Amino acid sequence: MTTLLDVRNVSKRFTMGGLFGRKTVDAVVDASFSLSAENPEIFTIIGESGSGKTTLARMILGLEDPSEGEILFRGEKVDRHAGRAERLKFMSHVQPVFQNPFEAFNPLKQIERYLESTARRFLDTSDKAVIDRAMDEALQKVGLSLKEVRGRFPHEMSGGQLQRCAIARALIPNPPLLIADEPVSMVDASLRMSIVNLLKSLRDDLKVSVIYITHDLATAYYISNRLIIMQRGRIVEMGDARTVLDSPEHAYSRLLKASVLSTDDAGDGKLMTDPAMVELAGSMVGQDGELVQRPDGRKVRVYA
Ligand SMILES: Nc1ncnc2c1ncn2[C@@H]1O[C@H](COP(=O)(O)OP(=O)(O)OP(=O)(O)O)[C@@H](O)[C@H]1O
């Protein structure tokens, strides 16, 4: 197997405050996983708010240095301090898609200006015909066209369409890997599935791997090949998405699943979870334990 991305024992500790009252947060603790270059997949990172998903993504994108461990992309260390040319080359391979498409675009700028500057930068050309072709090709990949987008401002599009434009922008350099951080959470519920299906078709038709970050178990179940579940910085379970979500083993994974299911029953919209389950999952926070491989290939964190 040729490895596309190799995350090796990566941790991130943030230190805040001055000399007195110094506080540290272990945002990510000893995370390891790898993606194959030959088998594009949707690899999902699931966890509640503050579990370390975005920090892990930012380290993969080279926007944040790990405190420990290293991240290799096609065998080369991801380095935030690399020179401009090297950084540009890396970014042409690994592209982000952010949560809020309305924040990603300046409301006063036509959408095509963004696509244009990305094309100019990555294709290293100012030939208008080449740039137009690259923009149109990328837009076609997300079900739009340059003709539809030309001259339009962000507010003239729906959140779903704008997120498509953001994905098109990310596709301009033909990256083998997209990092999509909660790409549907700000999109209207009725349009969410079309974006989720788009990610699926990028994998199946264009062979793009996607790291999909979410706290939504339903879409994770629907599109992921593999997933990791994170609790306060630690991976507590990792494996085939359906195996893990059909029968989660770690107490926290079970709690996540129960929380989702119980919203259907609760009627008043409150999460109804077993207090004993909440206590058990909570008691594991901050404990190291060990990720142990099970016969079915999944890894589950166990505690002494
Ligand atoms: N720059 C920073 N400085 C200090 N602490 C940080 C910083 N970035 C993240 N953290 C802390 O690290 C922990 C993990 O945050 P992170 O944003 O990675 O979680 P998340 O799972 O992505 O959450 P969300 O779903 O809310 O985006 C949190 O406790 C957060 O407060």
Image: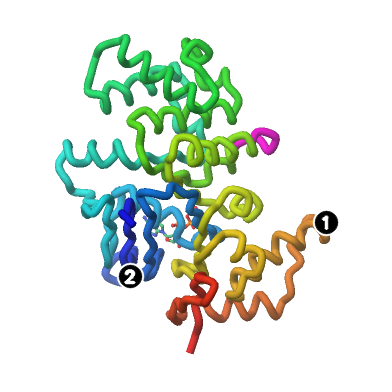
Residue lying furthest bottom: 304
Q: Is residue 188 magenta?
A: yes
Residue located at (45% from left, 20% from top):
111
Camera-side residue of 150 and 294: 294
Res 186 seen here: no
The residue identified by callout 2 is 22
The nearer-to-camera label among 1 and 2 is: 1
The residue identified by callout 1 is 268
Q: Is residue 107 magenta?
A: no
Instruction: State left or right for residue 285 relative to residue 75.
Output: right
Disc ID at residue 196: none
Camera-side residue of 176 and 52: 176
Does residue 14 lie above or below 203 as drawn? below
Extent of the magenta region = 187-191
Residue located at (55% from left, 41% from top):
200
Q: Helix or strand or loop: what does disc 2 sit on?
A: loop
